[in-house]
Amino acid sequence: MTVEYLKKATLTPESDASDTTDIVQGILSDIEAGGDAKALEYAAKFDRYDGPVVLSADDIAEASRRVPDGLKRDIAFAHDNVHRFAEAQKTTLRNVEVEIVPGFVAGQKIIPVSAAGCYIPGGRYSHIASAIMTVTTAKVAGCDHIIACSPPRPDIGINPAIIYTAHICGADKIVAMGGVQGIAAMTFGLFGLPKANILVGPGNQFVAEAKRILFGRVGIDMVAGPTDSLVLADETADPMVVAADLVGQAEHGYNSPVWLITDHRPLADEVMRLVPNLIDALPPMNRDNATAAWRDYAEVLLCSDREEMAATSDSYAPEHLTVQAADLDWWLERLSCYGSLFLGEETTVAFGDKASGTNHVLPTSGAASYTGGLSVHKFMKIVTWQRASQEGARPVAEATARISRLEGMEGHARTADLRLAKYFPNESFALNADAEHG
């Protein structure tokens, strides 16, 4: 049996192409040339905010006082979970030293980047969780300077809960500036900020495009597209739970794909019946996003068995992948392409998005086929070093000279020749490209 589409998308995120690149490149060029003043011009135009750009200790304290104690407890809970998971991830990286040949030692050293720029969305939704995910992870990695940047509300400023969260998670500077101008401020080191070595965090298409354009000058977590989610469900799944999970992710945006893959047609039919009613019950803004996402981007696929389901899922390489099916261990072992995996109905994407500990900054648009999401590893450089005795350098120098001459790189070869002549003046070596090794 071939995969049958019970519902097929009429659009893809690529269908939404626009002149975003030209717009973003123009803003970045203007701000790089004009500095602080030009960034403030764009902030006045797009953010419609003329308050302090870099928040003072008093600004942070005042915002913190406005956050309810109950919310502070929830933020502390989520922060602790993310912090502990990041600490566990950090232990998987370690310095290494190995003797390659007698007398020749090579090593690996783990060095955090100096300055991290964390973008925290605050427009349509105030992403408190993004502050936890990005700032906490950079702090655990050991970055010296962490900048949290979030768009202010017109004439009001950054949501107090975002300010409070960024502060307790370890941000050294909090910047009230959104969009491309915020990304530029962190990249170019405006307003007295250190220049960011890496930019992380979700954002709209303009933020994503700014990061893409700047990649190379700075590191980025990933090139991000609209968030996407896929549910794998068999006959044991609860249709209401499946439908609710799909709707919960569709509310992200009008172009956020959600997909259901199943081998049980009655489940698919019931989910498709339930989804419109669940969307209609959402608040207006959420309802508009979910309606468009379900109508234009959602897909429901019917497969013959679980192997075909798994293979199809891997071909989609979703950002979020939920399994609501029997034999969860089989799925954990079989599936290989996803940003984050949620096994069983007892967990859901929203848990990972907000509070469970795993990071919610994840690869989109099929990028999960080659990369994972944000982690302490993204903030750390794995560098190498080597050291040798004269005897240890000998076989390496001989091989280097011969390989270099075979490649036509005589200058490289002579750096090896020089050392052999200096360390072993009374010996001769066969260092031509056609010489026998050993």
Image (cartoon, rainbow, N blue to C red):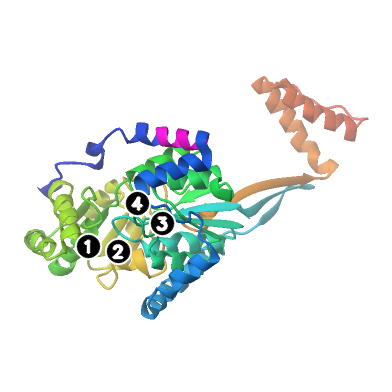
Residue at the image position 55 percent from the left and 64 percent from the top: 140
Question: What's the mark number on residue 248?
Answer: 1
CA–CA distance between discs 2 and 3?
19 Å
Contact, CB < 8 Å: mark 2 with mark 1?
A: yes
Q: Residues within 10 Å of mark 2 (few under 14, many from 20)?
A: many
Q: Nearer the viewer, residue 93 or 23?
A: 23
Residue type, mark 4 in image: Cys
Residue identified by numbered label 4: 337
Front position among marks 2 and 4: 2
Left or right position of 384 against 418: left
Reply above or below: 275 against 216: below
Q: Residues within 10 Å of mark 1 (few under 14, many from 20)?
A: many
Q: Nearer the viewer, residue 135 or 387?
A: 135
Question: What's the mark number on residue 120?
Answer: 3
Left or right position of 146 against 258: right
Front position among marks 1 and 4: 1
